Image (cartoon, grey):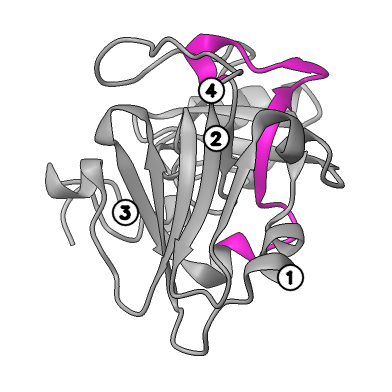
Amino acid sequence: MPLFRSKAEAKLAERGLDPARLPPGQYLTDKWPVLHAGGVPSTDLATWDFRVFGEVEQPLRLSWDELRALPSREVTLDIHCVTRWSRFDATFRGVPWSELAGRVRPRPGARFVVAHAEGEFTSNVPLSFLEDEQALLAYEADGEPLTPDHGWPLRLIVPRKYFWKSAKWLRGIELSSHDKPGFWERYGYHNEADYRQEERYGF
């Protein structure tokens, strides 16, 4: 009889799901809990724009219509929140980083990303995580436009990190030669946020 780390894993096995998909310390939910700091921003798509800047040869600014006109991709992945819930097989559609990278031409020294969102919120990851095939600038979730609570009109999707790295209400991507801790990292969250290593708090 197989041994499981937790009751959560045993329940996954009962549902025919691979318990190995659930990172340590997490539980599975079919819902998508809403968690963020502060209120939901008000957005006017007529004046909204998105920027890519920093260590790039050609800074870029796009309107909503220009962003939506770019080639898109759909990805399905499991998402894991630092508050310990996990949601399997979440589907997102949006623009892959490769579509923007070809336009802005990152400089050789660009190694890190700072995602800039509404309300001066930021999140940070190495550039390699945006180059992942499952990373997106997403505007749809599960076949529908993102809801305001979940980051409409645009949300960053970063695979293999706790979900706080996937910044809601995204307004820009800054490329940098050095790492810059984001909003939650400055409040004590772990800079790496690897859910397999339970990197929740502290460095």
Q: Which of pointers 4 and 1 indicates the residue nearer the eye?
A: 4
Q: Are marks 2 and 4 in contact (CB under 8 Å)?
A: yes
Residue 40 x/y as whole percent:
38, 11
Say which element carries label 1.
helix
Residue at numbered disc 3: 199
Q: Is residue 56 visible?
A: yes
Q: Whole-Å distance between the Cαs marked 4 and 1?
A: 25 Å
Q: Residue most toward the bottom?
A: 108
Identify which residue is drawn at 71% across, 40% down: 77
Residue at numbered disc 1: 102
Q: Whole-Å distance between the Cαs marked 1 and 2?
A: 19 Å
Q: Nearer the viewer, residue 23 or 48?
A: 48
Q: Is tag 3's residue or tag 1's residue first in the polypeptide sequence?
A: 1
- Up the image or down, 60 lies above or below 89; here it is below
Q: Which of pointers 2 and 3 indicates the residue nearer the eye?
A: 2
The quarter in which the N terminus is drawn is top right
The disc placed on residue 49 is 2
Q: Are marks 4 and 3 in contact (CB under 8 Å)?
A: no
Specify whether residue 140 is painted magenta. Answer: yes
Residue density around tag 3, few if under 14, some if 14–19, many if 20 or more, within 10 Å: some
Identify which residue is drawn at 76% across, 59% down: 99
Q: Is residue 4 visible?
A: no
Say which element carries label 4.
loop
Q: Which of pointers 3 and 1 indicates the residue nearer the eye?
A: 1
Residue at numbered disc 4: 47
Residue 38 x/y as whole percent:
24, 15
Magenta highlight range: 130-152
Say which element carries label 3.
loop
Q: Whole-Å distance between the Cαs marked 2 and 4?
A: 7 Å
